[in-house]
Amino acid sequence: MSTVRTHVLTGATSGIGAALARALAERGDALVLLARDEEKAATLCVELPQAQVLVADLAEPGTLNGLGRQVDGPVHSLVHAAGVVELAPVSRLRLVDLEEQLAVNLTAPAVLTRELLPHLRQGGGSVVFVNSTSGLSASADWSAYAASKAGLRAFADALRAEEAEHGVRVTSLFPSRTATPMQEKVHEQEGRHYDASEWISPQTVAGTILHVLDLPADATLPDVTVRPFRARTP
C-alpha cells in the first residue's frame, strides 16, 4: 500500500505554483499551501479543499518563524514557486522594490527551508527552488530580480552540499519566460505586446517539477533549465 506524499508549496494561487498544486491534488497527494493573507487563504481553501493552508507573508520573512511547528509528520517536497519582479534601471531602483524582491525571492525561501528541514529529513524529501534564467545571467533593468535569483541559486548550492548526508535532494529550476500573470506584468513594464502562446506554459514547468519530484532515490537533478522551443520551418 502506497504512502501519501506531502508537499509544501508557495505561490499556489497563480502561475506555475497553481498548476503544480492542481496536478499534485489530482493524483491524491497531500498539500500544505502558503497564502499571503486570509483572503488568499480562503480562495485556496475553496479551490483545493483537501489542502492545509497556512497564512504567511513572504514579503515579511519573519512571519515564517515557527511555521515548521504547524506542519505534522514527514514532508516529501518543498517547492518555492512564489516570486515577485519589478523592473527598473539601477539609477531609478527604489529601495522598497529592491527589499521586496530580496525578501520574497531569497530571504523567505531561506527561512522557510530552515523551518521545514526536520520534516524534509524525516521524509527523505526534495527542495525545489523555482529560479529563473535571470538567476544565470542578468540583463539591463533586471538588477534587483536577477540579484535575488542569483542569491537563491547560491543558497541552493550550499543547501545541497549540506543536506546530502541527510537524504534531502535539492534542485534549482531555471525556467525562461513562462506564460503567467507575472510575465504579463513584465511585458507591460517593458512596453511590449504580450502573447501567452510565445512562452512556456505553466503546466509544462509544473510537469518538469513533477519529474524532479518523482525521480527514483538513486538519482537527482541539481540544475534544470527550461526554455521555449519553436520548431524551425523548412
Image: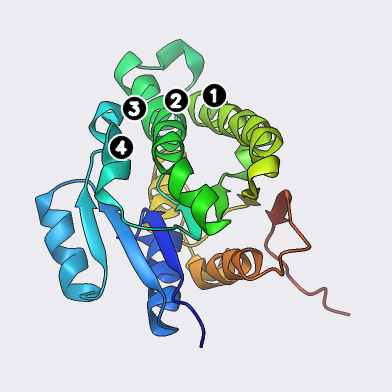
Q: Point out residue 38 in the picture as x, y percentages from the top left corner.
A: 10, 51
Q: Point out residue 91 in the picture as x, y percentages from the top left corner.
A: 46, 11
Side of 111 relative to 149 (left or right): left
Q: Which mark is residue 58?
A: 4
Residue at 10% in and 55% down: 39
Look at mark 3 in the image and give the residue it sits on. Answer: 100
Give the amino acid type for the residue marked by disc 2 in the picture.
Ala
Give the amino acid type for the residue marked by disc 1 in the picture.
Ser
- Which picture quadrant has residue 12? bottom left
Give the vertical position of 23 relative to 157 (above or below). Answer: below
Give the amino acid type for the residue marked by disc 3 in the picture.
Glu
The mark closer to the camera, 2 or 4, is 4
Q: Which mark is residue 175?
A: none
Between the residue at mark 2 and the residue at mark 4, the CA separation in whole angstroms equals: 22 Å
Contact between marks 3 and 4 (CB within 8 A): the answer is no
Q: Secondary structure at mark 1?
A: helix
10 Å crowding of disc 3: few (<14), some (14-19), many (20+): many
Q: Point out residue 33 in the picture as x, y percentages from the top left corner.
A: 30, 58
Look at mark 1 in the image and give the residue it sits on. Answer: 143
- Which picture quadrant has residue 48? bottom left
Look at mark 2 in the image and give the residue it sits on. Answer: 88
Residue at 29% in and 35% down: 64
Q: Point out residue 172 in the picture as x, y percentages from the top left corner.
A: 64, 46
Give the amino acid type for the residue marked by disc 4 in the picture.
Leu
Between the residue at mark 4 and the residue at mark 1, the CA separation in whole angstroms equals: 20 Å
Residue at 40% in and 83% down: 26
Between the residue at mark 3 and the residue at mark 2, the CA separation in whole angstroms equals: 14 Å
